[in-house]
Image: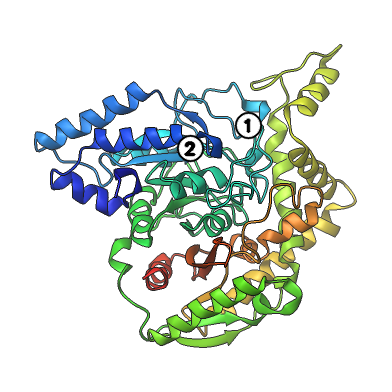
Amino acid sequence: MSLNAKTISELIEAFEAGEATAEDAAGAVLDAIEAGENLNAFISVRERDAVLAEARAVDEARQNGAELGALAGVPVAVKDNLCVKGGQTTAASRMLAEFEAPYSATVVERLQDAGAILVGKTNLDEFAMGSSNENSFFGPALNPHDPERVPGGSSGGSAVAVAANQCVAALGSDTGGSIRQPASHCGVVGVKPTYGRVSRYGLIAFASSLDQVGPLTRSVDDAARLLEVICGFDPRDATSARRDVPKFTDAVGRGVEGLKLGVPKEYFASEVGVDDEVGALVRAAIDDLEAQGAELVEVSLPHTEYAVATYYLIATAEASSNLARYDGARYGFRAEGEDLVEMYENSRSEGFGDEVKRRIMLGTYVLSAGYYDQYYGKAQQVRTLIRQDFDDAFDKVDAIVAPTAPTPAFALGDKSENPLQMYLEDIFTISCNLAGLPGMSVPCGATAAGLPVGLQVLAPAFDEETMLAIGAVVEA
């Protein structure tokens, strides 16, 4: 197996056994990025000499017996809505195409402190708004299992990079399923931690009460290793939780004996449109969990049918507020105009893509005088009911298992002209964000056409360990 195809644990074992060097691994990853350039997984790749120099420094430190971090020499990538000091940070938007971040996100600092080698920034839907990665100013990322299909979004570039061995692991961000859905479509593991578990400092905001940073990896154990590095309180993020960071890797291999797993009946109802092959593969994985010792319990999440509408009212309202700062005056793209107002109008009209403008307009409308209580206020009330649904379910079960996405990866352009149909791609992942819970997607098989399918595991807040234990059984 080539070095760039190994998991984190396999790579570190090879380093420690003297069978490979960090420089070899970094070189193999950079070669894979070059060979797979057609997949458009990366918006920017660091200079080869700089990456190899960092890797050589790790090798020298290892040879000298220095104490190394948990990810020493592991080549990683991060979604291009995470700031890296001195580097290009675009959020896949023309608005920020020339922006260089003056500081690094906390999660990037923690990766680098742990010895990871950053190789580049991955593609995404503009400002993380989308379910297909077709809304990038830099063009769509392509699914490595079928380049005629989307990888999912918005963290499509990170999922492609991991699936195509163009990095060993990557970070994405998940506002309504943006880690889990592309993980499902590309056949990798994707984790959205509990809201507040991971710092959002340095993450370019889309919807602040929903955004969360998390890993995309080739194994559940790798996801646990990354979580141990990036989780933890950050005083620079007011929403960061003061919680101890468990040794997540201890949960991998714990098994599911004695666990009660909830199967939400609403997620398998005929009206939600689960593809037959997806439904069969997910059902088979759930049955296998039962065979491994788990008890299956049917649960109900009765407000699921309102989740998509609730999400798009809250998320767009927050997006319209967060993106108001991009006016052409302070930083980012600026267009010419006859006066100040026309400069604002031209800058925002030319700097943002269609999907971003659609969400800003919708968000501005629901926050406007006369409609705030009718739309935004009502959505917040429904959000509370959705959270209560999960609280009631977790009184009876330890975790919930369900499909990650209703379909396998769909063809490029298939849903671009129908935004509502596109929004329904996140129907099974959105509730998790509204409730602030942890969720993960684990590969559970592939369709007859070879397209990956993911099983989603949802757990109570701050119980990522149970989620990882279940995920490890699914991938075994």
User: Label for residue 42?
Assistant: none
Q: Indicate left or right for 95 with 118 as reference.
A: right
The residue identified by callout 2 is 36
Residue sitting at x 76%, y 75%: 271
Residue 339: x %, y % from top left: 85, 13
Residue 368: x %, y % from top left: 85, 46
Q: Amino acid at mark 1?
A: Phe
User: Label for residue 138?
Assistant: 1
- The 10 Å Cα crowd at callout 2, few under 14, some 14 to 19, many 20 or more, is some
Residue lying at the far left in this picture: please name it.
Answer: 64
Residue sitting at x 52%, y 22%: 100
- Image marks 2 and 1: residues in contact by CB distance under 8 Å: no
Q: Circle 2 sits in a helix, a strand or a loop, which is it?
A: loop
Q: Indicate left or right for 378 with 1 as reference.
A: right
The front one of 25 and 394 is 25
- In the image, residue 157 above or below residue 452: above
Residue 402: x %, y % from top left: 57, 73
Q: Amino acid at mark 2?
A: Gly
Residue sitting at x 33%, y 60%: 221
